[in-house]
Amino acid sequence: MSGQEKTIIKNEEWMCAKCGVSLVPKNTIFAYMGMTFSHEVLRCPSCGMAFISKELADGKMAEVEQLMEDK
Ligand SMILES: [Zn+2]
């Protein structure tokens, strides 16, 4: 609707730069502005580091902010 293109990670395999292993999608719980929400993010199965794209961060944060404003 906004006309913005979104980067979809699909065929491309993401690797942890530190461990050199493929990242796996894992449901992760975030807390932001007193609210919690879960989203599937890519995580390294070895060191557990989560890789959150800017698109996801911006999108989710904006969503939470909207939810709060709509109340
Ligand atoms: Zn790692």
Image: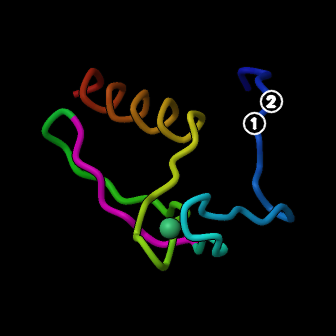
Residue position marked by numbered label 2 in the rendering:
5
| Count of labels in the image | 2
User: Where residue 22 sits in the image (x, y, percent)?
Assistant: 66, 74
Residue 50 counted in the magenta span: no
Disc 2 secondary structure class: loop
Residue 27 counted in the magenta span: yes
Q: Residues within 10 Å of mark 2 (few under 14, many from 20)?
A: few
Residue position marked by numbered label 1 in the rendering:
6
Q: Give the range drawn in magenta.
A: 25-32
Magenta stretch, overall SS:
strand
Q: Is residue 71 above or below residue 34?
A: above
User: Where residue 58 sits in the image (x, y, percent)?
Assistant: 49, 30
**Quadrant location of the N terminus?**
top right
The answer to whether mark 2 and mark 1 are in CB contact below 8 A is yes
Q: Which amino acid does label 2 sit on?
A: Glu
Q: Which amino acid does label 1 sit on?
A: Lys
